[in-house]
């Protein structure tokens, strides 16, 4: 038995055959993409001003770090001022918006869904708010809050809150009223109904809403930083594009993709599978 076979058996034991097959199938498109990217560099199909070499994109990390000559507040238009600060700035805004938007969305969604009349009155508002892209509010946000963190935070909260609220509202309304009446018959309180009927019953919809809100919120954040921000990955991409530093633009795009893929696959997908599978609402492949 050679080393390749030994490694294959070890990986199958570690991850399982089905999961390992899924991982390998997911890697193939990236191998093809980076292979075509490298072939473009070797054969010069498109000039570097359109698609830079892979090496120059990764070298841009150290270049951006070395370019910083002071704190970001002093060198405000230099995208090289601590590349990690741009990453942390975007992550901090997302984290703040999630901490504020998700709890309020869940609480208000549960309270609204408990009453049929209130939920029927608020459902059209949820549909209306979700139909409007968060970026559509950007011009008004700039007028109201100016350029900076408040504008991007407003866009994020507007995206995250309405998605979580609307999914929670629909999740609570889908819970059979028979369960509520059963709890009341057994002497349960309204708090027991919320914690033991509505919230668990709506949990799959709530988690789906959280996953959707983080995905749409991340996109809205990048666009808001490009136009109305003064820091962050979106701001870095916008300034680099103005200076024709295409490798830095590609670097920002790759970092955005990696952060979102890690967040989605490492945190959100397992959470969604756990909640949905626990309530028997998903098909499990054999």
Image (cartoon, rainbow, N blue to C red):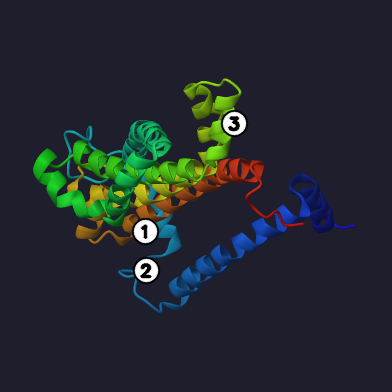
Q: CA distance from mark 3 to mark 2?
A: 63 Å
Dot 2 or dot 1: first in sequence order is: 2
The residue that disc 2 covers is 51
- Estimate how packed mark 1 is, as few (under 14), some (14 to 19) or many (20 or more) residues with alpha carbons within 10 Å: many
Q: Which quadrant of the figure has residue 182? A: top right
Instruction: Check residue 56 in the rendering and tell me which mark sits there, or answer none.
Output: none
- Residue 285, percent from left and from top: 72, 57
- Estimate how packed mark 3 is, as few (under 14), some (14 to 19) or many (20 or more) residues with alpha carbons within 10 Å: few
Q: Are the residues tagged 2 and 1 within 8 Å (C-beta)?
A: yes
Q: Give 47 or 229, whichever is nearer the viewer.
A: 229
Q: CA distance from mark 2 to mark 1?
A: 8 Å
Does 111 sit above or below residue 204?
Answer: above
The residue that disc 3 covers is 182
- Residue 110, percent from left and from top: 42, 35
**Residue at image location 65% in from the left, 41% down from the top:** 278
Q: Seen in the image, is 155 located left or right of residue 261?
A: left
Q: Of circles 3 and 2, which is in front?
A: 3
């Amino acid at each position: 038995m050679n080393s390749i076979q030994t490694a294959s058996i070890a990986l199958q034991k570690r991850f399982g055959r089905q999961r390992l097959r899924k991982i390998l199938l997911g890697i193939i498109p990236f191998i093809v993409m980076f292979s075509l990217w490298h072939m473009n560099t070797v054969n010069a199909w498109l000039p570097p001003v359109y698609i830079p070499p892979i090496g120059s994109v990764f070298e841009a990390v150290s270049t951006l770090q070395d370019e910083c000559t002071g704190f970001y507040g002093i060198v405000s238009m230099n995208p090289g001022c601590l590349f990690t600060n741009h990453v942390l700035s975007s992550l901090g805004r997302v984290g703040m918006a999630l901490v504020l938007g998700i709890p309020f969305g869940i609480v208000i969604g549960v309270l609204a869904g408990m009453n049929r009349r209130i939920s029927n009155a608020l459902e059209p508002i949820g549909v209306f708010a979700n139909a409007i892209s968060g970026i559509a509010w950007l011009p008004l946000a700039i007028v109201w809050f100016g350029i900076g963190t408040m504008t991007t935070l407003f866009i994020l909260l507007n995206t995250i809150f309405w998605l979580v609220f609307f999914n929670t509202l629909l999740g609570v309304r889908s819970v059979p009223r028979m369960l509520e009446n059963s709890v009341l018959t057994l002497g349960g309180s309204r708090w027991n109904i919320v914690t033991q009927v509505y919230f668990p019953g709506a949990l799959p919809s709530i988690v789906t809403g959280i996953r959707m809100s983080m995905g749409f919120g991340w996109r809205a954040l990048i666009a808001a930083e490009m136009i109305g921000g003064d820091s962050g990955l979106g701001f870095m991409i916008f300034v680099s594009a103005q200076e024709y530093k295409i490798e830095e633009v590609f670097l920002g795009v790759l970092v955005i993709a990696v952060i979102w893929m890690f967040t989605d696959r490492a945190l959100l997908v397992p959470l969604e599978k756990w909640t949905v599978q626990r309530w028997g609402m998903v098909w499990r492949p054999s």
